[in-house]
Amino acid sequence: MIDCACWGKPLGSTQLWENHLVTINRILSIANRIQIREPGDDQYPKMEHLPEEVVREVLLRLTDHKDLENSSKAYSVMARVVDEQRIWRELTQFHFTPQQISFVLNTMPNPVQDWQAVYHKLRKAFGLREEYAEMIQLCRNCRCLFWKSIGHPCIAEKDPAFQEKLEDVDKSSLHVPIPPQAFLRFFSL
């Protein structure tokens, strides 16, 4: 029998834990076979051989200022591209609404905008937008947590009396996304 206890109490079914352990073991097996090797001096292209336009496109897809700042330490072309206003302007536009941006722009004295300074002011004032590939969903009907991509067979949907109540309800509002920080708070002591 698998130990499926959390804080001394059973959490989930034994079958669910067995499925999770199989998945974890499969992931570990794949991860253990991965070998990362430094490319030899004779292998091309390397990052420093890529055209500046390609480096810029790579940097434009980063969503964290720390990644940008660390990238600038890699080599001179990346440092030069990270200093471009366009990189910081697009990062700012990704994380903040036009209203938030105009609010901060109106408070800045210099008409020539330093988008890196604007980004950091906005970050301190409003925090960063969080983007996730998928979030856990909470079913308002049965209070079950589930992954949207896997689906959720709500047990409350089998109840005919409950089905009548659902006729007047917007079905899209029945599942509430739970961000990772909120999910972790479920387990705080």
Image (spheres, rainbow, N blue to C red):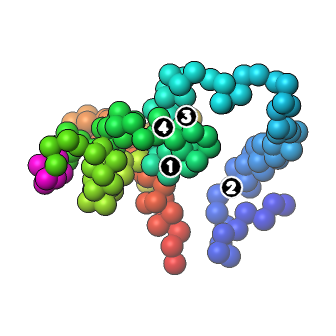
**Distance between mark 2 and mark 1 Cα atoms:** 45 Å
Residue 60, relative to residue 186: is it above or below?
Answer: above
Residue 91, relative to residue 47: is it above or below?
Answer: below
Q: Which mark is residue 80?
A: 4
For the residue marked with disc 3, what is the amino acid? Val
Q: Which mark is residue 13?
A: 2
- Front residue of 152 and 96: 96
Q: Nearer the viewer, mark 1 or mark 4?
A: 4
- Front residue of 172 and 107: 107
Residue 7, relative to residue 11: is it above or below?
Answer: below
How many numbered tags mark residues here?
4
- The residue that mark 1 highlights is 69
Sequence-wise, the earlier of marks 2 and 1 is 2
Q: Residues within 10 Å of mark 1 (few under 14, many from 20)?
A: some
Residues under numbered marks 1 and 3 in contact, where contact means CB atoms less than 8 Å apart: no
**Distance between mark 3 and mark 2 Cα atoms:** 54 Å
Q: Report the span colored magenta.
A: 103-109
Secondary structure type for disc 4: helix
Q: Nearer the viewer, mark 2 or mark 1?
A: 1
Q: Main secondary structure of the magenta part?
A: helix
